[in-house]
Image (cartoon, rainbow, N blue to C red):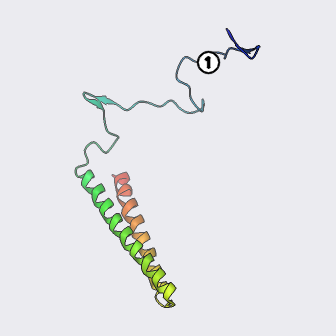
Amino acid sequence: MSQTVNSGTVPARPLRRSLGPARANPDDPPVQPPPRGRYGPLPGPRYLGIPGRAAIVQGQVLLVALIVIVQLWLVTDALYELLSGRTSLLPWLALVSLLGFGLVLLITLWPRRQLAEE
């Protein structure tokens, strides 16, 4: 089976050797599909019975959003101080901004570590 292109022939593409789905890396281990329940796939391990998980995530999102808003205000204030020539507050503003960044990391990573220990 060949196609004619500009008075030349292009050989047909060879067939794949395996009949299963193509894998990007043949050395990867086989992936098991998630277990299925009566109404579809079941949630991942340890997340099936954690009460209040959605409330925890919503609290994290709220706290991180508030900290980001405060950091934006700090950057605005730091730029105002810098452009007005008063640089005495800049180290303190940078320190508070770094503390906010550390707090965001703590809020984001701490519950994940707690869940891994259970």
Q: Nearer the viewer, residue 84 or 75?
A: 84
Q: Nearer the viewer, residue 118 or 107?
A: 107
- Three-letter residue code for mark 1: Arg
Q: Residues within 10 Å of mark 1 (few under 14, many from 20)?
A: few
Residue sticking out furthest to the top: 1
Where disc 1 sits, the SS reads loop
Q: Nearer the viewer, residue 72 or 63?
A: 72
Q: Return the x and y of residue 24 as percentages of the image width and height.
A: 59, 32
Q: Which residue is at 34% across, 53% downward?
A: 115
Q: Which residue is at 42% across, 81% downward?
A: 77
- Residue 103 drawn above or below residue 12: below
Q: Return the x and y of residue 23 as percentages of the image width and height.
A: 56, 29
Residue highlighted by disc 1 = 16
Residue sticking out furthest to the front: 6
- Residue 57 drawn above or below residue 81: above
Q: Quadrant of the N terminus?
A: top right
Q: How many marks?
A: 1
- Residue 37 drawn above or below residue 86: above
